[in-house]
Amino acid sequence: MKSILTIENLSKSFTLHNLNKHIRALDRIDLDVKEGEFVGITGKSGSGKSTILKSIYRTYAIKGGDIWYASKKFDRINLAEASERQIVYLRKHEIGCVSQFLNVMPRTTARELVEQAIAEMGSSEDAAMREAEKMLAHFELDEELWDSYPATFSGGEKLRLNIAIAMAKRPRLLLLDEPTASLDNSSKIKVKILIEQLMKEGTTMLGIFHDLEFMKNLCTREYRIQDGKFLPGGNVVS
Amino acid sequence: MNDFESPILSVKNLNKQYGAGCGHCRTGDEERLMKNYCPKCGTVYACRHISFDLYPGEVFGIVGESGSGKSTLMQCLYFDQDVTGGEAYIRTYKNGEVNLFGESSQQKRHIRNHQMGKVYQNPVLGLRMGFSSIGNIAEKLIAAGSRNVGAMEGRGRTLLEHVNIPVRRMKEPPKNFSGGMQQRVQIAKALSNNPPILLLDEVTTGLDLSVQASVLDLIKKLQRQLNISIIIVSHDLGVIRMLADRTMVMLDGRVIEYGLTDQILEDPQHRYTQQLVHSLL
């Protein structure tokens, strides 16, 4: 199968000027994700899991190494060197990211948020409206909530909306940054069902989960990370 | 790297200085300056070698402390001030082949009226406070060549409705209005001639929180509906976070950092940006 994401020699450090500190977060990481896979990254907190995802999404500036992504629009592109406008395009159209925090425009209803996400992909207003309702129902968000502001939602509702927004775009690559960290069991199960559906639909995913049990049943391969390096033999097929 | 789209506005090596400079500072050796001025002759280098591109439909943020040159840059772009050096090109003006700063003052007026709209922090600068609100819009329409009173009134109504000013108050002068309303009239005026570029200079500074929210919501709505390109200057990182895809950080007249807005906020590189972002928490 073809690789959708190939990371070579990725290093990342943080220089904190006021504290006069230099923190090494990732040390020459190699990682490969094939189309349709669900790859998990496990490790203690502080080991560099999120840093990998944030580097791919370019929330972090990359200091060394290459992140090759097989884009539909740009063909093979190095995310470490892509222009900011290219990254903006990819975030809108190809690469999604879900974390446990809902980070959306304030004073916008759940329905509008999903509609806007779909409209950004170039759908007509009508089509976006219909598709948004489908997504909200699909993600089992109470109809009463569709026209209210997410700031008033519970943790589980926020997360499901978060995934709905990311999924509405049908990204080719979805990054999951501990999306289930603060959820109760029944919400976790709902998220799990959604992830399984996405896998069936062919979305490639790269995720970090706190809950190892949860992840083990889902992912096709697993990398183990410690102190910014992958453990030897950590690339386990589960 | 970025040839999949072309910028609507390109600014190249823009410089603005106050004062003639002297033998000490003219060498271009920036080490000789104290912050942004020359300790020998007092010349202030307000904008130094500023280059950036603005793309269609994007919101581009500019942050920096007071005195960093943000507003001077905006004034130069809108020809409120003459530049000392540098170039700017707009794709929809003469095919983007002519440096705007080299044009005659007549042409510059034309560019101001057709290619750009600007909203100032202080409404007094952007509006005639004693004229009616619709008259303010008509002024901009007339400047762009409109002569039909009925058409202008229709356009004025549409614009004021767009920015949520009740039409029954359109004949009132902005001096009767609250700060938030004045800002909204300014936005309507700036949009009069459907410019491709909108310059927003600290538009929400000094407004109370709920009014600030309504102005920001309006900007977001306009950007989505009109697909206009916006440069927004603010020292409020919350405003930038909410609106801008890309951001540039200025200090002492220079650009010290460019990046995706979330990268600037979560992984700032420059010492000053780190200080700025950490001040937020």
Image: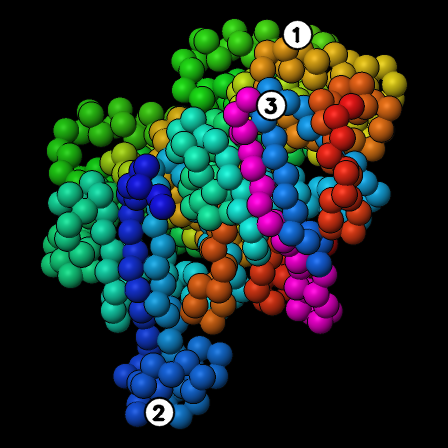
Residue B270 lies left or right of residue B86; in this view the side is: right
Provide the chain ID for the residue under circle 1.
A
Q: Amino acid at mark 1?
A: Ala
Place residue A196 in its image quadrant: top right
Tags 1 and 3 touching, CB below 8 Å: no
Rendered-image quadrant of the N terminus of chain A: top right
x and y percentages locating residue B170 in the rendered image: 37, 32
Check the image and report above or below for A214 versus B175: above
Q: Do discs 3 and 2 belong to a common subunit?
A: no
For label 1, count other residues whose C-alpha is less than 10 Å away and answer few (under 14), some (14-19) or many (20+). some
Rendered-image quadrant of the C terminus of chain A: top right
Q: Earlier in the sequence, mark 1 or mark 3?
A: 1
**Residue in the foreground of this view, choosing between B77 and B34:** B34
Marks 3 and 2, how far apart in space? Answer: 60 Å
Marks 1 and 2, how far apart in space? Answer: 69 Å
Residue A53 lies left or right of residue A91; in this view the side is: right
* Residue range of the region highlighted in magenta in the rendering: A1-23
**Residue in the foreground of this view, choosing between A223 and B117:** A223
Q: Nearer the viewer, mark 1 or mark 3?
A: 3
For label 3, count other residues whose C-alpha is less than 10 Å away and answer few (under 14), some (14-19) or many (20+). many
Place residue A231 in its image quadrant: top right
Q: Which mark is residue A137?
A: 1
Q: Nearer the viewer, mark 3 or mark 2?
A: 3
Q: Which mark is residue B24?
A: 2
Q: Amino acid at mark 3?
A: Thr
Q: Residue at x 64, y 22 (%)?
A: A37
Q: Amino acid at mark 2?
A: His
Q: Residue at x 65, y 34 (%)?
A: A103
Helix, strand or loop under label 1: helix
Q: Which mark is residue A204?
A: 3
Helix, strand or loop under label 2: loop
